[in-house]
Image: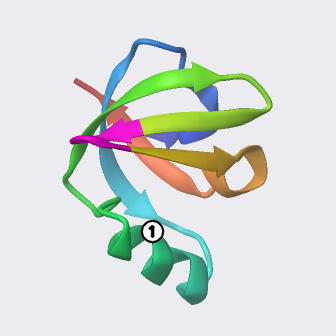
Amino acid sequence: MHPLNTTEAGEQINIQCLGCNCQDACRLRELGCIEGVKGKIISNNSNIVLQIGESRLAISEELARTILVSLK
């Protein structure tokens, strides 16, 4: 497992752990970013754009450091 901010554009990932504060974790879960879900990195510049299903989430680099993922 490694932090989301270390991924590259185009990589397929699995969310493993949301290590952020409770408020951020709850909001991410409401948006479909939950443990075990698969996603794809669209962009990894200053913010990470993560596609989960048909939704795209823009995640700050600071928040992305707290989200652990594994590569598919």
Type of amino acid at the residue the image marks with label 1: Leu
Q: Magenta segment range?
A: 51-55
Image quarter hosting the C terminus: top left
Residue at x-position 61% and y-position 58%: 66
Query: Which secondary structure is most common in the magenta stretch?
Result: strand
Position of 55 relative to 63 (above/below):
above
Q: Is residue 39 left or right of residue 24?
A: left
- Verify whether residue 54 appears in magenta: yes
Position of 41 relative to 47 (above/below):
above
Position of 67 relative to 58 (above/below):
below
Q: Specify the farthest residue to the front.
A: 54
Residue that mark 1 sits on? 28
Residue at x-position 54% and y-position 15%: 8
Q: Nearer the viewer, residue 44 or 67?
A: 44
Residue at x-position 29% and y-position 63%: 34
Q: Residue 46: where, in percent of width, then height?
A: 80, 31
Q: Is residue 61 left or right of residue 17?
A: right
- Verify whether residue 47 appears in magenta: no
Instruction: Tell me the quarter of the picture where residue 1 sits.
Output: top left
Q: Residue 30: where, in percent of width, then height?
A: 35, 76
